[in-house]
Amino acid sequence: MSTRYYITTPIYYVNDRPHIGHCFTTVMADVQARYRRLRGDDVFFLTGTDEHADKVVTAAKMRGLSPEEWTDRNAAAFREAFAFLNCSNDDFIRTTEARHRERVERYIAALITTGDVYKGEYEGWYDEGQEEHITENAAREAGYKSTISQRPLVKRSEPCYFFRLSKYEARLLSLIESNEWGIEPEARRSETLGRIRAGLGDVAMSRPVTDDPATQWGIRIPGDPGHRLYVWIDALFNYLSVVDTPERRGYWPADVHLIGKDILWFHAVIWPAVLLALRGSSSEWSWVELPRRVFGHGWWTADGRKMSKSDGNFIEMERLESCAKVFGLDALRWYLTSQGPMAGGDSDWVHARVVEVYNADLANGIGNSASRVSNMIGKYFPAGLPEPGPANHAGHDWRAIAGKRVEAYARAMEAMGYSEACAATTGLVAEVDAYINATQPFKLAKRAEAEPGVLGELATILTNCAEALRIATVLMHPVMPSKTVELWSRWGWRLPEGAGLEAVCAFGGPHALTPGTPIVKGEALFMRHDPAGG
Ligand code: MSP
Protein backbone atom coordinates (compact mmCIF):
# COMPACT_ATOMS: atom_id res chain seq x y z
CA MET A 1 0.00 0.00 0.00
CA SER A 2 1.23 3.46 -0.77
CA THR A 3 2.24 5.88 1.94
CA ARG A 4 -0.33 8.49 2.81
CA TYR A 5 0.84 12.07 2.79
CA TYR A 6 -1.19 15.00 4.08
CA ILE A 7 -0.03 18.57 3.47
CA THR A 8 -1.78 21.82 4.36
CA THR A 9 -1.40 25.54 3.73
CA PRO A 10 -2.69 28.24 6.05
CA ILE A 11 -6.27 29.17 5.33
CA TYR A 12 -6.33 32.75 4.13
CA TYR A 13 -8.26 35.71 5.46
CA VAL A 14 -11.01 36.24 3.02
CA ASN A 15 -11.01 40.02 3.47
CA ASP A 16 -7.81 40.33 1.53
CA ARG A 17 -7.35 39.84 -2.20
CA PRO A 18 -4.98 37.02 -3.07
CA HIS A 19 -1.38 38.25 -3.36
CA ILE A 20 2.11 36.79 -3.67
CA GLY A 21 2.18 35.75 0.01
CA HIS A 22 -0.87 33.51 -0.28
CA CYS A 23 0.13 32.31 -3.74
CA PHE A 24 3.64 31.47 -2.66
CA THR A 25 2.64 29.24 0.25
CA THR A 26 0.04 27.43 -1.82
CA VAL A 27 2.34 26.90 -4.82
CA MET A 28 5.10 25.62 -2.50
CA ALA A 29 2.65 23.15 -0.99
CA ASP A 30 1.56 22.18 -4.49
CA VAL A 31 5.16 21.45 -5.47
CA GLN A 32 5.51 19.15 -2.47
CA ALA A 33 2.16 17.47 -3.14
CA ARG A 34 3.11 16.81 -6.75
CA TYR A 35 6.52 15.54 -5.69
CA ARG A 36 4.93 13.09 -3.24
CA ARG A 37 2.52 11.87 -5.92
CA LEU A 38 5.54 11.35 -8.16
CA ARG A 39 7.02 9.19 -5.41
CA GLY A 40 3.83 7.15 -5.51
CA ASP A 41 2.32 8.44 -2.26
CA ASP A 42 -1.40 8.77 -1.69
CA VAL A 43 -1.54 12.53 -1.19
CA PHE A 44 -4.13 14.80 0.35
CA PHE A 45 -3.45 18.49 -0.19
CA LEU A 46 -5.61 21.06 1.56
CA THR A 47 -5.98 24.83 1.28
CA GLY A 48 -8.86 27.22 1.88
CA THR A 49 -10.16 30.41 3.47
CA ASP A 50 -10.48 31.67 7.03
CA GLU A 51 -13.78 33.53 7.13
CA HIS A 52 -14.79 34.34 10.70
CA ALA A 53 -12.63 37.41 11.28
CA ASP A 54 -14.48 40.42 12.70
CA LYS A 55 -13.36 42.61 9.81
CA VAL A 56 -15.54 40.58 7.45
CA VAL A 57 -18.77 42.02 8.82
CA THR A 58 -17.52 45.59 8.59
CA ALA A 59 -16.16 45.13 5.08
CA ALA A 60 -19.39 43.52 3.90
CA LYS A 61 -21.50 46.28 5.44
CA MET A 62 -19.44 48.99 3.77
CA ARG A 63 -20.34 47.43 0.43
CA GLY A 64 -23.97 46.86 1.27
CA LEU A 65 -23.49 43.11 1.25
CA SER A 66 -24.19 40.39 3.79
CA PRO A 67 -21.11 38.72 5.30
CA GLU A 68 -22.10 35.58 3.39
CA GLU A 69 -22.20 37.39 0.05
CA TRP A 70 -18.88 39.07 0.76
CA THR A 71 -17.13 35.86 1.78
CA ASP A 72 -18.59 33.96 -1.19
CA ARG A 73 -17.17 36.55 -3.51
CA ASN A 74 -13.72 36.61 -1.95
CA ALA A 75 -13.38 32.89 -1.39
CA ALA A 76 -14.06 32.54 -5.11
CA ALA A 77 -11.15 34.92 -5.82
CA PHE A 78 -8.81 32.63 -3.85
CA ARG A 79 -10.09 29.53 -5.60
CA GLU A 80 -9.57 31.20 -8.97
CA ALA A 81 -6.08 32.37 -8.07
CA PHE A 82 -5.00 28.87 -7.06
CA ALA A 83 -6.62 27.32 -10.14
CA PHE A 84 -4.80 29.87 -12.29
CA LEU A 85 -1.52 28.85 -10.62
CA ASN A 86 -2.30 25.22 -11.46
CA CYS A 87 -2.48 24.09 -7.84
CA SER A 88 -3.64 20.54 -7.41
CA ASN A 89 -5.32 20.84 -4.00
CA ASP A 90 -7.67 17.97 -3.20
CA ASP A 91 -10.09 20.13 -1.25
CA PHE A 92 -10.74 23.78 -0.44
CA ILE A 93 -12.17 24.45 2.99
CA ARG A 94 -14.15 27.52 3.97
CA THR A 95 -14.57 27.84 7.72
CA THR A 96 -18.16 28.99 7.25
CA GLU A 97 -19.11 25.59 5.86
CA ALA A 98 -21.31 23.37 8.03
CA ARG A 99 -18.89 20.44 7.76
CA HIS A 100 -16.30 22.56 9.58
CA ARG A 101 -18.56 24.35 12.07
CA GLU A 102 -20.31 21.20 13.28
CA ARG A 103 -17.05 19.40 13.98
CA VAL A 104 -15.49 22.39 15.70
CA GLU A 105 -18.50 22.55 18.03
CA ARG A 106 -17.89 18.93 18.96
CA TYR A 107 -14.16 19.51 19.59
CA ILE A 108 -14.89 22.48 21.87
CA ALA A 109 -17.62 20.59 23.73
CA ALA A 110 -15.13 17.77 24.40
CA LEU A 111 -12.54 20.26 25.69
CA ILE A 112 -15.10 21.90 27.99
CA THR A 113 -15.90 18.50 29.51
CA THR A 114 -12.31 17.95 30.61
CA GLY A 115 -11.84 21.50 31.86
CA ASP A 116 -9.09 22.27 29.33
CA VAL A 117 -11.46 24.92 28.08
CA TYR A 118 -12.92 26.84 31.02
CA LYS A 119 -14.87 30.01 31.67
CA GLY A 120 -12.99 32.75 33.47
CA GLU A 121 -12.64 36.50 33.57
CA TYR A 122 -10.76 38.32 30.88
CA GLU A 123 -9.26 41.63 31.82
CA GLY A 124 -8.24 43.97 29.07
CA TRP A 125 -8.42 47.44 27.55
CA TYR A 126 -11.78 48.68 26.37
CA ASP A 127 -12.85 51.66 24.28
CA GLU A 128 -16.15 52.70 25.86
CA GLY A 129 -17.18 55.03 23.05
CA GLN A 130 -16.61 52.34 20.44
CA GLU A 131 -17.67 49.45 22.69
CA GLU A 132 -14.58 47.67 21.52
CA HIS A 133 -11.90 45.57 23.19
CA ILE A 134 -8.37 46.69 22.39
CA THR A 135 -5.39 44.37 22.61
CA GLU A 136 -2.49 45.32 24.86
CA ASN A 137 -0.27 46.06 21.86
CA ALA A 138 -2.83 48.24 20.12
CA ALA A 139 -3.59 50.06 23.38
CA ARG A 140 0.09 50.77 23.98
CA GLU A 141 0.55 52.03 20.44
CA ALA A 142 -2.42 54.37 20.82
CA GLY A 143 -1.09 55.72 24.12
CA TYR A 144 -3.95 54.01 25.99
CA LYS A 145 -6.43 56.40 24.38
CA SER A 146 -9.27 55.78 21.94
CA THR A 147 -8.05 56.30 18.39
CA ILE A 148 -11.54 57.64 17.60
CA SER A 149 -12.63 59.80 20.55
CA GLN A 150 -9.20 60.27 22.21
CA ARG A 151 -10.85 59.41 25.55
CA PRO A 152 -8.73 57.23 27.83
CA LEU A 153 -9.22 53.50 27.46
CA VAL A 154 -10.57 51.73 30.54
CA LYS A 155 -9.68 48.35 32.02
CA ARG A 156 -12.61 46.08 31.78
CA SER A 157 -13.16 42.54 32.78
CA GLU A 158 -15.75 40.20 31.44
CA PRO A 159 -16.44 36.49 31.26
CA CYS A 160 -14.53 34.65 28.59
CA TYR A 161 -13.45 31.11 27.72
CA PHE A 162 -9.80 30.19 28.11
CA PHE A 163 -7.69 27.35 26.82
CA ARG A 164 -5.47 25.83 29.51
CA LEU A 165 -2.23 26.18 27.55
CA SER A 166 -0.15 26.34 30.76
CA LYS A 167 -0.93 22.68 31.45
CA TYR A 168 0.90 21.62 28.28
CA GLU A 169 4.13 23.55 28.76
CA ALA A 170 6.26 20.60 29.90
CA ARG A 171 4.76 18.20 27.32
CA LEU A 172 5.37 20.63 24.49
CA LEU A 173 8.94 21.22 25.55
CA SER A 174 9.76 17.54 25.64
CA LEU A 175 7.97 16.85 22.33
CA ILE A 176 9.90 19.62 20.62
CA GLU A 177 13.21 18.73 22.24
CA SER A 178 12.85 15.11 21.11
CA ASN A 179 11.69 16.25 17.65
CA GLU A 180 8.50 14.23 17.91
CA TRP A 181 6.84 17.52 17.13
CA GLY A 182 9.05 18.93 14.40
CA ILE A 183 9.41 22.67 13.97
CA GLU A 184 11.41 23.67 10.91
CA PRO A 185 13.69 25.24 9.96
CA GLU A 186 15.99 24.95 12.97
CA ALA A 187 16.04 28.70 13.70
CA ARG A 188 12.27 28.66 14.16
CA ARG A 189 12.48 25.64 16.41
CA SER A 190 14.94 27.28 18.77
CA GLU A 191 13.00 30.55 18.74
CA THR A 192 9.88 28.61 19.78
CA LEU A 193 11.70 26.66 22.49
CA GLY A 194 12.98 29.93 23.95
CA ARG A 195 9.51 31.41 24.11
CA ILE A 196 7.99 28.33 25.73
CA ARG A 197 10.76 28.25 28.32
CA ALA A 198 9.83 31.83 29.23
CA GLY A 199 6.51 30.39 30.39
CA LEU A 200 3.08 29.71 28.92
CA GLY A 201 -0.09 31.34 30.22
CA ASP A 202 -3.64 30.29 29.38
CA VAL A 203 -5.10 31.88 26.27
CA ALA A 204 -8.41 33.66 25.84
CA MET A 205 -10.29 31.89 23.08
CA SER A 206 -13.71 33.46 22.94
CA ARG A 207 -15.24 36.86 22.28
CA PRO A 208 -18.57 38.05 23.67
CA VAL A 209 -21.66 38.23 21.47
CA THR A 210 -23.66 41.47 21.85
CA ASP A 211 -26.38 43.29 19.90
CA ASP A 212 -23.73 44.57 17.51
CA PRO A 213 -23.89 42.44 14.36
CA ALA A 214 -20.09 42.53 14.12
CA THR A 215 -19.93 40.39 17.25
CA GLN A 216 -22.37 37.81 15.93
CA TRP A 217 -20.12 36.44 13.20
CA GLY A 218 -18.37 33.26 14.30
CA ILE A 219 -18.86 29.83 15.80
CA ARG A 220 -20.72 29.88 19.14
CA ILE A 221 -19.35 28.18 22.23
CA PRO A 222 -21.47 25.02 22.57
CA GLY A 223 -24.02 25.49 25.36
CA ASP A 224 -23.18 29.19 25.82
CA PRO A 225 -24.30 31.19 22.77
CA GLY A 226 -23.32 34.51 24.37
CA HIS A 227 -19.73 33.66 23.42
CA ARG A 228 -18.15 32.91 20.10
CA LEU A 229 -14.90 31.25 19.30
CA TYR A 230 -11.91 33.45 18.58
CA VAL A 231 -11.08 33.24 14.89
CA TRP A 232 -7.65 31.59 15.33
CA ILE A 233 -8.88 28.59 17.30
CA ASP A 234 -11.70 28.11 14.80
CA ALA A 235 -9.22 28.38 11.91
CA LEU A 236 -6.61 25.93 13.19
CA PHE A 237 -9.23 23.23 13.48
CA ASN A 238 -9.68 23.21 9.69
CA TYR A 239 -6.72 20.87 9.36
CA LEU A 240 -8.54 18.29 11.41
CA SER A 241 -12.19 18.91 10.52
CA VAL A 242 -11.65 18.32 6.79
CA VAL A 243 -10.25 14.82 7.28
CA ASP A 244 -12.50 13.94 10.22
CA THR A 245 -14.69 11.68 8.10
CA PRO A 246 -14.65 7.89 7.84
CA GLU A 247 -13.15 8.03 4.33
CA ARG A 248 -10.42 10.52 5.10
CA ARG A 249 -9.42 9.76 8.65
CA GLY A 250 -6.49 7.71 7.39
CA TYR A 251 -4.77 10.88 6.21
CA TRP A 252 -4.43 12.10 9.79
CA PRO A 253 -1.95 13.03 11.25
CA ALA A 254 -0.89 15.77 8.84
CA ASP A 255 2.67 15.28 7.61
CA VAL A 256 3.37 18.98 7.32
CA HIS A 257 1.67 22.29 7.94
CA LEU A 258 3.39 24.68 5.56
CA ILE A 259 3.02 28.25 6.82
CA GLY A 260 4.76 31.62 6.84
CA LYS A 261 7.03 32.58 9.73
CA ASP A 262 4.58 35.22 11.01
CA ILE A 263 2.03 32.65 12.10
CA LEU A 264 4.44 30.20 13.68
CA TRP A 265 3.34 30.64 17.30
CA PHE A 266 -0.23 29.55 16.66
CA HIS A 267 0.91 26.54 14.69
CA ALA A 268 3.96 25.50 16.67
CA VAL A 269 2.55 25.92 20.18
CA ILE A 270 -1.18 26.52 20.46
CA TRP A 271 -2.23 24.00 17.81
CA PRO A 272 -0.33 20.95 19.16
CA ALA A 273 -1.47 21.79 22.70
CA VAL A 274 -5.10 21.93 21.59
CA LEU A 275 -4.67 18.57 19.86
CA LEU A 276 -3.06 17.01 22.94
CA ALA A 277 -6.02 18.27 24.96
CA LEU A 278 -8.53 16.87 22.49
CA ARG A 279 -6.80 13.51 22.26
CA GLY A 280 -6.79 13.29 26.05
CA SER A 281 -10.46 14.23 26.39
CA SER A 282 -11.97 10.83 25.55
CA SER A 283 -11.28 7.62 23.68
CA GLU A 284 -13.36 8.99 20.82
CA TRP A 285 -10.39 11.18 19.94
CA SER A 286 -7.61 8.70 20.56
CA TRP A 287 -6.80 8.71 16.80
CA VAL A 288 -5.95 12.40 16.93
CA GLU A 289 -2.18 12.12 17.02
CA LEU A 290 0.06 15.14 16.65
CA PRO A 291 0.94 16.24 13.13
CA ARG A 292 4.53 15.44 12.22
CA ARG A 293 5.92 18.88 11.53
CA VAL A 294 5.32 22.52 10.83
CA PHE A 295 7.53 24.40 8.40
CA GLY A 296 7.68 28.21 8.63
CA HIS A 297 9.00 29.77 5.44
CA GLY A 298 10.36 33.30 5.05
CA TRP A 299 8.81 36.27 3.31
CA TRP A 300 9.01 37.92 -0.07
CA THR A 301 10.07 41.53 -0.25
CA ALA A 302 9.78 43.64 -3.40
CA ASP A 303 12.75 45.53 -4.82
CA GLY A 304 14.47 45.39 -1.45
CA ARG A 305 11.52 46.70 0.56
CA LYS A 306 8.94 45.10 2.78
CA MET A 307 5.68 44.87 0.89
CA SER A 308 2.93 46.97 2.32
CA LYS A 309 -0.49 48.14 1.27
CA SER A 310 0.29 51.74 2.16
CA ASP A 311 3.44 51.79 0.04
CA GLY A 312 1.49 50.24 -2.81
CA ASN A 313 4.36 47.85 -3.56
CA PHE A 314 2.48 44.63 -2.88
CA ILE A 315 2.84 42.02 -5.58
CA GLU A 316 -0.80 41.32 -6.34
CA MET A 317 -2.46 38.84 -8.67
CA GLU A 318 -2.26 41.30 -11.58
CA ARG A 319 1.54 41.34 -11.37
CA LEU A 320 1.72 37.56 -11.15
CA GLU A 321 -0.68 37.20 -14.06
CA SER A 322 1.29 39.55 -16.25
CA CYS A 323 4.49 37.73 -15.34
CA ALA A 324 2.85 34.44 -16.35
CA LYS A 325 1.70 36.07 -19.59
CA VAL A 326 5.21 37.12 -20.54
CA PHE A 327 7.18 34.09 -19.34
CA GLY A 328 4.54 31.38 -19.02
CA LEU A 329 2.91 30.08 -15.86
CA ASP A 330 5.44 27.29 -15.39
CA ALA A 331 8.26 29.84 -15.52
CA LEU A 332 6.54 31.86 -12.79
CA ARG A 333 6.24 28.69 -10.68
CA TRP A 334 9.92 27.98 -11.38
CA TYR A 335 10.93 31.44 -10.19
CA LEU A 336 8.86 31.19 -7.01
CA THR A 337 10.18 27.72 -6.24
CA SER A 338 13.84 28.13 -7.08
CA GLN A 339 14.21 31.64 -5.66
CA GLY A 340 11.56 31.73 -2.93
CA PRO A 341 12.16 32.09 0.82
CA MET A 342 11.93 28.59 2.22
CA ALA A 343 14.45 27.64 4.92
CA GLY A 344 16.79 30.58 4.44
CA GLY A 345 16.02 34.25 4.99
CA ASP A 346 13.62 36.36 2.98
CA SER A 347 13.71 36.62 -0.82
CA ASP A 348 13.51 39.71 -2.89
CA TRP A 349 11.35 39.95 -6.00
CA VAL A 350 13.24 41.91 -8.64
CA HIS A 351 12.09 41.92 -12.24
CA ALA A 352 15.63 41.80 -13.62
CA ARG A 353 16.21 38.65 -11.58
CA VAL A 354 13.03 37.06 -12.97
CA VAL A 355 14.45 37.60 -16.47
CA GLU A 356 17.88 36.36 -15.49
CA VAL A 357 16.63 33.13 -13.90
CA TYR A 358 14.25 32.53 -16.79
CA ASN A 359 16.98 32.89 -19.40
CA ALA A 360 19.60 30.92 -17.49
CA ASP A 361 17.56 27.98 -16.20
CA LEU A 362 14.80 27.69 -18.75
CA ALA A 363 15.50 29.34 -22.12
CA ASN A 364 19.26 28.63 -22.24
CA GLY A 365 18.98 25.65 -19.90
CA ILE A 366 16.43 22.90 -20.30
CA GLY A 367 14.66 24.61 -23.23
CA ASN A 368 17.79 24.94 -25.36
CA SER A 369 19.14 21.54 -24.44
CA ALA A 370 15.84 19.81 -25.23
CA SER A 371 15.55 21.52 -28.59
CA ARG A 372 19.15 20.77 -29.57
CA VAL A 373 18.65 17.10 -28.79
CA SER A 374 15.20 16.95 -30.44
CA ASN A 375 16.52 18.65 -33.57
CA MET A 376 19.48 16.34 -33.93
CA ILE A 377 17.43 13.19 -33.39
CA GLY A 378 14.76 14.44 -35.81
CA LYS A 379 17.37 15.25 -38.41
CA TYR A 380 19.73 12.29 -38.13
CA PHE A 381 17.17 9.64 -37.19
CA PRO A 382 14.00 10.52 -39.09
CA ALA A 383 12.65 7.02 -38.52
CA GLY A 384 12.50 7.72 -34.78
CA LEU A 385 14.55 7.43 -31.63
CA PRO A 386 17.42 4.96 -32.27
CA GLU A 387 18.27 2.00 -30.06
CA PRO A 388 20.35 3.12 -27.07
CA GLY A 389 24.05 2.31 -26.91
CA PRO A 390 26.19 1.97 -23.78
CA ALA A 391 25.12 4.28 -20.94
CA ASN A 392 28.75 4.56 -19.88
CA HIS A 393 30.26 6.46 -22.78
CA ALA A 394 33.07 8.94 -23.45
CA GLY A 395 33.90 9.24 -19.79
CA HIS A 396 30.26 9.85 -18.83
CA ASP A 397 28.71 7.17 -16.66
CA TRP A 398 25.11 8.24 -17.12
CA ARG A 399 23.59 5.80 -14.65
CA ALA A 400 25.82 7.17 -11.92
CA ILE A 401 25.43 10.80 -13.01
CA ALA A 402 21.64 10.65 -13.10
CA GLY A 403 21.48 8.54 -9.92
CA LYS A 404 23.45 11.13 -7.98
CA ARG A 405 21.28 14.00 -9.16
CA VAL A 406 18.06 12.14 -8.40
CA GLU A 407 19.30 11.36 -4.92
CA ALA A 408 20.32 14.96 -4.21
CA TYR A 409 16.99 16.16 -5.56
CA ALA A 410 14.97 13.76 -3.40
CA ARG A 411 16.93 14.66 -0.29
CA ALA A 412 16.38 18.36 -0.90
CA MET A 413 12.69 17.89 -1.68
CA GLU A 414 12.03 15.97 1.53
CA ALA A 415 13.66 18.80 3.50
CA MET A 416 11.70 21.43 1.49
CA GLY A 417 15.02 22.74 0.23
CA TYR A 418 13.55 23.79 -3.08
CA SER A 419 16.43 25.85 -4.39
CA GLU A 420 18.77 22.86 -3.96
CA ALA A 421 16.20 20.57 -5.57
CA CYS A 422 15.91 22.90 -8.56
CA ALA A 423 19.70 23.11 -8.76
CA ALA A 424 19.92 19.31 -8.95
CA THR A 425 17.71 19.37 -12.05
CA THR A 426 19.54 22.22 -13.80
CA GLY A 427 22.80 20.50 -12.86
CA LEU A 428 21.72 17.40 -14.76
CA VAL A 429 20.85 19.52 -17.81
CA ALA A 430 24.28 21.16 -17.60
CA GLU A 431 25.89 17.71 -17.67
CA VAL A 432 24.02 16.95 -20.88
CA ASP A 433 25.34 20.17 -22.41
CA ALA A 434 28.87 19.35 -21.31
CA TYR A 435 28.55 15.86 -22.86
CA ILE A 436 27.35 17.36 -26.15
CA ASN A 437 30.25 19.79 -26.16
CA ALA A 438 32.69 17.01 -25.43
CA THR A 439 31.37 14.50 -27.99
CA GLN A 440 30.36 16.97 -30.74
CA PRO A 441 27.52 14.93 -32.28
CA PHE A 442 26.95 17.49 -35.09
CA LYS A 443 30.50 16.85 -36.32
CA LEU A 444 29.98 13.11 -36.12
CA ALA A 445 26.83 13.48 -38.18
CA LYS A 446 28.82 15.06 -41.00
CA ARG A 447 31.25 12.17 -40.96
CA ALA A 448 28.42 9.63 -40.86
CA GLU A 449 27.60 10.24 -44.53
CA ALA A 450 30.99 8.82 -45.51
CA GLU A 451 31.44 6.41 -42.59
CA PRO A 452 28.18 4.61 -41.79
CA GLY A 453 29.78 3.02 -38.71
CA VAL A 454 29.74 6.39 -37.00
CA LEU A 455 25.95 6.41 -36.91
CA GLY A 456 25.98 3.96 -33.98
CA GLU A 457 28.16 6.34 -32.00
CA LEU A 458 25.81 9.21 -32.81
CA ALA A 459 22.84 7.14 -31.66
CA THR A 460 24.58 6.41 -28.36
CA ILE A 461 25.22 10.08 -27.70
CA LEU A 462 21.76 11.30 -28.60
CA THR A 463 19.86 8.57 -26.76
CA ASN A 464 21.98 9.19 -23.67
CA CYS A 465 21.19 12.91 -23.91
CA ALA A 466 17.49 12.32 -24.40
CA GLU A 467 17.30 9.84 -21.55
CA ALA A 468 19.11 12.22 -19.17
CA LEU A 469 16.78 15.04 -20.18
CA ARG A 470 13.79 12.78 -19.65
CA ILE A 471 14.97 12.27 -16.08
CA ALA A 472 15.75 15.97 -15.56
CA THR A 473 12.24 16.88 -16.68
CA VAL A 474 10.65 14.24 -14.45
CA LEU A 475 12.40 15.98 -11.56
CA MET A 476 11.18 19.36 -12.82
CA HIS A 477 7.64 18.12 -13.23
CA PRO A 478 6.34 19.06 -9.73
CA VAL A 479 7.42 22.65 -10.40
CA MET A 480 6.50 22.85 -14.09
CA PRO A 481 3.66 20.40 -14.63
CA SER A 482 2.71 21.67 -18.11
CA LYS A 483 5.96 22.32 -19.95
CA THR A 484 7.38 18.96 -18.93
CA VAL A 485 4.33 17.13 -20.27
CA GLU A 486 4.57 19.18 -23.46
CA LEU A 487 8.12 17.98 -24.01
CA TRP A 488 7.25 14.37 -23.20
CA SER A 489 4.40 14.36 -25.69
CA ARG A 490 6.90 15.35 -28.39
CA TRP A 491 9.07 12.45 -27.31
CA GLY A 492 6.19 9.97 -27.16
CA TRP A 493 6.61 9.49 -23.42
CA ARG A 494 4.14 9.58 -20.56
CA LEU A 495 4.65 9.66 -16.83
CA PRO A 496 3.63 6.22 -15.54
CA GLU A 497 1.22 6.54 -12.65
CA GLY A 498 2.22 5.33 -9.21
CA ALA A 499 5.51 3.82 -10.43
CA GLY A 500 7.61 5.62 -7.84
CA LEU A 501 10.44 8.07 -8.31
CA GLU A 502 13.25 5.55 -8.35
CA ALA A 503 11.76 3.37 -11.07
CA VAL A 504 10.71 6.31 -13.22
CA CYS A 505 14.13 7.91 -12.89
CA ALA A 506 16.23 4.81 -13.49
CA PHE A 507 18.50 5.61 -16.45
CA GLY A 508 17.64 3.15 -19.23
CA GLY A 509 15.31 1.44 -16.77
CA PRO A 510 11.75 0.12 -17.21
CA HIS A 511 10.37 3.57 -18.03
CA ALA A 512 13.07 4.72 -20.43
CA LEU A 513 12.24 6.34 -23.77
CA THR A 514 11.06 3.84 -26.37
CA PRO A 515 13.28 3.25 -29.42
CA GLY A 516 11.47 3.86 -32.69
CA THR A 517 9.38 6.75 -31.33
CA PRO A 518 9.33 9.63 -33.82
CA ILE A 519 10.70 12.79 -32.19
CA VAL A 520 8.71 15.94 -32.89
CA LYS A 521 10.82 19.09 -32.90
CA GLY A 522 8.13 21.60 -32.01
CA GLU A 523 8.59 25.22 -31.00
CA ALA A 524 11.02 26.32 -28.31
CA LEU A 525 9.66 25.38 -24.89
CA PHE A 526 10.94 28.67 -23.49
CA MET A 527 11.68 31.51 -25.89
CA ARG A 528 14.70 33.53 -24.85
CA HIS A 529 13.67 36.82 -23.25
CA ASP A 530 15.40 40.02 -24.20
CA PRO A 531 16.04 41.93 -20.97
CA ALA A 532 15.95 45.20 -22.91
CA GLY A 533 12.42 44.33 -24.03
CA GLY A 534 11.05 44.82 -20.49
N1 MSP B 1 -5.94 33.30 8.46
C1 MSP B 1 -4.61 33.26 8.97
C2 MSP B 1 -4.03 31.86 8.93
C3 MSP B 1 -4.84 30.83 9.64
S1 MSP B 1 -4.16 29.24 9.44
C4 MSP B 1 -5.02 28.28 10.51
C5 MSP B 1 -3.72 34.18 8.15
N2 MSP B 1 -4.13 34.46 6.92
S2 MSP B 1 -3.42 35.47 5.87
O1 MSP B 1 -4.37 35.69 4.82
O2 MSP B 1 -2.90 36.60 6.54
O3 MSP B 1 -2.27 34.66 5.14
C6 MSP B 1 -1.18 34.32 5.78
C7 MSP B 1 -0.16 33.61 4.91
O4 MSP B 1 0.36 34.42 3.87
C8 MSP B 1 0.98 33.29 5.85
O5 MSP B 1 1.52 32.03 5.60
C9 MSP B 1 1.94 34.40 5.54
O6 MSP B 1 3.24 34.08 5.89
C10 MSP B 1 1.75 34.55 4.05
N3 MSP B 1 2.28 35.82 3.62
C11 MSP B 1 1.72 37.06 3.73
N4 MSP B 1 2.60 37.96 3.22
C12 MSP B 1 3.73 37.35 2.79
C13 MSP B 1 4.89 37.71 2.09
N5 MSP B 1 5.19 38.98 1.81
N6 MSP B 1 5.74 36.72 1.70
C14 MSP B 1 5.47 35.38 1.90
N7 MSP B 1 4.38 35.01 2.54
C15 MSP B 1 3.61 35.98 3.20
O7 MSP B 1 -2.68 34.56 8.62
Image (cartoon, rainbow, N blue to C red):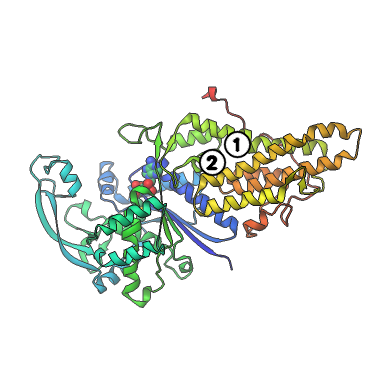
Find residue 385 and report its horizontal and vertical position in percent: 79, 45
Left/right placement of residue 28 relative to residue 447 reads left
Left/right placement of residue 516 relative to residue 262 reads right
Q: Residue 237 got which mark?
A: none
Residue 501 occupies which quadrant of the picture? bottom right
Residue 73 visible, this angle: no
Left/right placement of residue 135 relative to residue 29 reads left
Find residue 150 and report its horizontal and vertical position in percent: 10, 39
Q: Toward the viewer: 331 or 64?
A: 331
Residue visible at 42% across and 59% down?
293
Identify residue for label 2. 334
Identify residue for label 1. 362
Tell how many labels: 2
Q: Toward the viewer: 402 or 150?
A: 402
Find residue 179 and report its horizontal and vertical position in percent: 41, 62
Q: CA distance from mark 1 to mark 2?
A: 9 Å
Residue 104 vs 530, above or below: the answer is: below
**Figure quadrant of the N terminus:** bottom right
Cβ–Cβ under 8 Å for marks 1 and 2: yes
Going from the N terminus, do you reach mark 1 or mark 2 first?
Answer: 2
Residue 371 visible, this angle: yes
Tell me the SS state at disc 2.
Answer: helix
Q: Toward the viewer: 117 or 439?
A: 439
Find residue 460 and report its horizontal and vertical position in percent: 80, 44
